[in-house]
Image (cartoon, grey):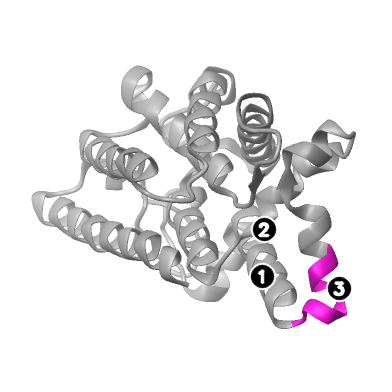
Amino acid sequence: MFIRNESFGQFIRAYHVVTALIIIHIILYLWIYMFPYLGGREIRFYGIGSNFHIYMGEYWRLVTPIFLHGSLAHMLFNSFSLFLFGPALEQMLGKVKFIFVYFFTGIIANIATYLLDDLYTFHLGASGAIYGLFGIYLYMVLARKDLIDQTNSQLIMTILIIGIIMTFVGTNINVLAHLFGLIAGAAIAPVALRKVSRYGNFRNVHDTEEIGFDPNRWQKSARNKKRLKTIFIVAGVVLVLLFIIQFFI
């Protein structure tokens, strides 16, 4: 479910939404921090989530923070998370539904920050939307076991538990965005996953040049399950390191 078998070019062609979001993350980060006097400062100023400015009627700030990040590690952490966990849902839900779910959960996270946090709170990041994706996976694990096997369920729950713990022990973390993004994802999951089969839009691979997914992956041998666990351990370590490093950049 989370093992990529595509080349770089195939990944771009197969996962348009995930690719576009990651590219936007990178471009906006570089623009803001490398070219502040060529519009970068204005992008950050008018795009940052600011409860006070939202209170004054600047409602676009409920959306724009989803694209912006406060540091290089912050941007890499969210982009890498999207790279790992976005493709399976983009294929399963379809592009339109995936876009809706991603922004719905991100906006709900920002609305919760506005309603429940201090009036002078500022925030940036796609974390609310990414935790929204985790919310959908959480719903699969708890209520749609037909959509995810035991190995992937265990890996998702491990990553999610680590993420929640780090949400509360870290500094400069928008706890409300993480929690309400997760809740929003789980809440919308029954609708988003309606009529979705176990393989969704996944295709069986008969031609090695064809992009797709082999449904037999869901019943891999012990060796391939071990490989999957190893990949997730490495990915988890990378995510944790990026999460920690972002506080020192």
Instruction: Tell me, for residue 76, which label it has, or none.
Output: none
Quadrant position of residue 244 = bottom left
Residue type highlighted by circle 2? Leu
For label 1, the crowd category at 10 Å Cα-Cα, with few meaning under 14, some 14 to 19 and many 20 or more, is many
Magenta range is 35-42
For label 3, the crowd category at 10 Å Cα-Cα, with few meaning under 14, some 14 to 19 and many 20 or more, is few
Q: Secondary structure at mark 1?
A: helix
* Type of secondary structure dominating the magenta stretch: helix
Which of marks 2 and 3 precedes in the sequence?
A: 3
Residue type highlighted by circle 1? Tyr
Magenta-drawn stretch contains 36: yes
Q: CA distance from mark 3 to mark 2?
A: 14 Å
Q: Residue under circle 3?
A: 39
Magenta-drawn stretch contains 12: no
Left-right relation of 159 to 243: left
Q: CA distance from mark 1 to mark 3?
A: 12 Å
What residue is rendered at 69% in x and 64% in y?
Answer: 24
For label 2, the crowd category at 10 Å Cα-Cα, with few meaning under 14, some 14 to 19 and many 20 or more, is many
Q: Secondary structure at mark 3?
A: loop
Compared to residue 249, the image places residue 101 above or below, namely: above
Q: Residue under circle 1?
A: 29
Whether label 2 touches label 1, CB < 8 Å = yes
What residue is rendered at 73% in x and 37% in y?
Answer: 51
What residue is rendered at 25% in x and 61% in y?
Answer: 231
Residue type highlighted by circle 3? Gly
What residue is rendered at 84% in x and 80% in y?
Answer: 37
Left-right relation of 206 to 190: left
Compared to residue 79, the image places residue 139 above or below, namely: above
Compared to residue 168, the image places residue 147 above or below, namely: above
Which of marks 3 and 1 precedes in the sequence?
A: 1
Q: Residue under circle 2?
A: 68
